[in-house]
Image: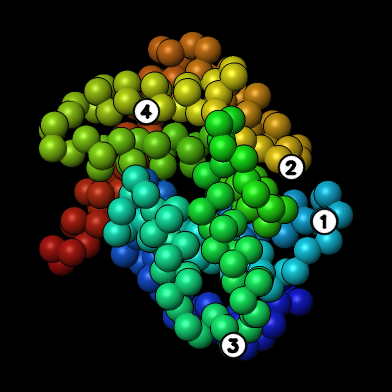
Amino acid sequence: MEKINKQLKQYIEENILPQYDLNNIGGHGIDHIKTVMIRCFEIIEEFKLDINKDMIYTIAAFHDIGYKKDPDKHEEVSSEMFKNDHNIAKFFNQEQIDIMAEAIVDHRASLEYEARSIYGKIVSSADRETSVENMLERSFLYQADKHQAENPSVRQIIEYSYKKLSSKYGKGGYAKMYYPDKKYTDYLETMQSLLEDEEKFVQAEMKIAKKIERKNKKEIEEDER
């Protein structure tokens, strides 16, 4: 990402990325954003895509910024927050801003919904997880938060996770990938194998749940010192 406009990169790092400190619900925090940024450039290089790198960097930075405000409609909210950031006009013209706002909405492209530009296709592809362990953890945290009012058991959270991931990454799942590099195809093969055996999936999620429990316990103990 060394070719990114230095002033733009500084603005994003100082004003946009810090907002994700309060946004780590179900794996939509700063670690995820940085991963998507890296994946965008891996895909661009792998598939030799001719695009404006400043634009894709900015789209990746903003794509989940609205998650803390409205998880279910965060694509549209993130796009509106982007359009309302008047500092962006210092770096891009109106046509570029319109394309970027559209691409932010399109990052959740699925079998029923196509990304409308190459920028939407790149960020949608980069947003696909390539680590089974990370996906299991993100899914568990997301379902625990989504169903918090039900006070679900760990097993119930895992059942919600299994249903969601099966519909997304199972055979014929809705997750749309425009640029399937080896990282993604290896991930998808492993995830689909896991989803074909529900009990195997439950055991894997149980390990993740225990890991999260240990992490939370450690944080509580540190806060009490």
**Which residue occupies the foreground of this view, 85 or 20?**
85
State yes or no: discs 1 and 2 in contact (Cβ < 8 Å): yes
Which quadrant is the C terminus positioned in? bottom left
The N terminus - image quarter: bottom right
* Quarter holding residue 206: top left
From the image, state whether disc 1 or disc 3 is nearer to you.
Answer: 3
The amino acid pointed to by label 4 is Ser
| Upstream in sequence: badge 1 or badge 2 | 1
Q: Which residue in the structure is indicated by mark 1? A: 49
* Spatial separation of the CA atoms under disc 4 and disc 1: 34 Å
Q: Which residue was labeled with disc 4?
A: 161
Q: Amino acid at mark 3?
A: Lys
Residue 31 visible in the shown view? no
Is 185 situated left or right of 62 in this image? right
Q: CA distance from mark 1 to mark 2?
A: 10 Å
The residue where tag 2 is placed is 179
Displayed quadrant of residue 34: bottom right
